[in-house]
Image (cartoon, helix red, strand yellow):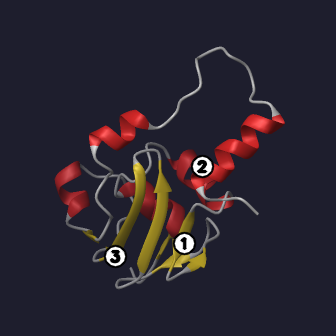
Amino acid sequence: MESVRVDVWVWSVRLYASRSAASTACKGGQVHVNGKRAKASQAVHVGDKVEATTPGGPRVVIVKGLLSKRVGAAPAREAYEDHSPPPPPREIRLSMPQRDRGAGRPTKRERRKLEQLRGRDG
């Protein structure tokens, strides 16, 4: 086996909980291979750098082994070398503003403030 689909690989090494979540992340531009946006069907080879935005935060891994089926956590960790940035300290995570559950959608003004806070102002 020389290559595996990127959506299958990120699912099998447990970066995403389901294959459909991995495929959706690829379609949404949340998975990059060697710095380029990856389609779900793109091939991954040993030595490739895979960057993924997962629910647990950004992940940066180097492919060390190819897997086409989901395996346990220990064998999955052997299939990649993790270069992910450390998560932010707990104090920073708790200080981030969060919207009250059930408060509805943010207004345009609130969205602009959120984007400015996140550094995405255009």
**How many marks are shown on the rendered structure?**
3
Where does label 3 land, which residue? 63
Q: Is residue 68 visible?
A: no
For badge 2, the amino acid type reads Leu
Q: Is residue 120 left or right of residue 11?
A: right
- Which residue is found at the position 58% from the left and 60% from the top? 30
Secondary structure beneath label 3: strand
Q: Is residue 35 left or right of residue 85?
A: right
Where does label 2 land, which residue? 117
Front: mark 1 or 3: 1
Task: Measure the alpha-carbon separation of dots 1 and 3.
Answer: 13 Å
Structural crowding at the residue carrying mark 1, measured as other residues with C-alpha within 10 Å and reported as few (<14), some (14–19) or many (≥20)? some
Front: mark 2 or 3: 2
x and y percent of residue 108 in the render? 82, 37
Q: Which mark is residue 12?
A: none
- Which residue is found at the position 17% from the left and 54% from the top? 74
Where does label 1 land, which residue? 32
Image quadrant in which the C terminus is located: bottom right
Q: Which label's residue is closer to the chain start, 2 or 3?
A: 3
Q: Quadrant of residue 10?
A: bottom left
Front: mark 2 or 1: 2
Q: Which label's residue is closer to the chain start, 1 or 3?
A: 1
x and y percent of residue 107 in the render? 80, 31
Task: Measure the alpha-carbon separation of dots 2 and 1.
Answer: 25 Å
- In the image, residue 38 sits, relative to residue 94, either above or below, namely below
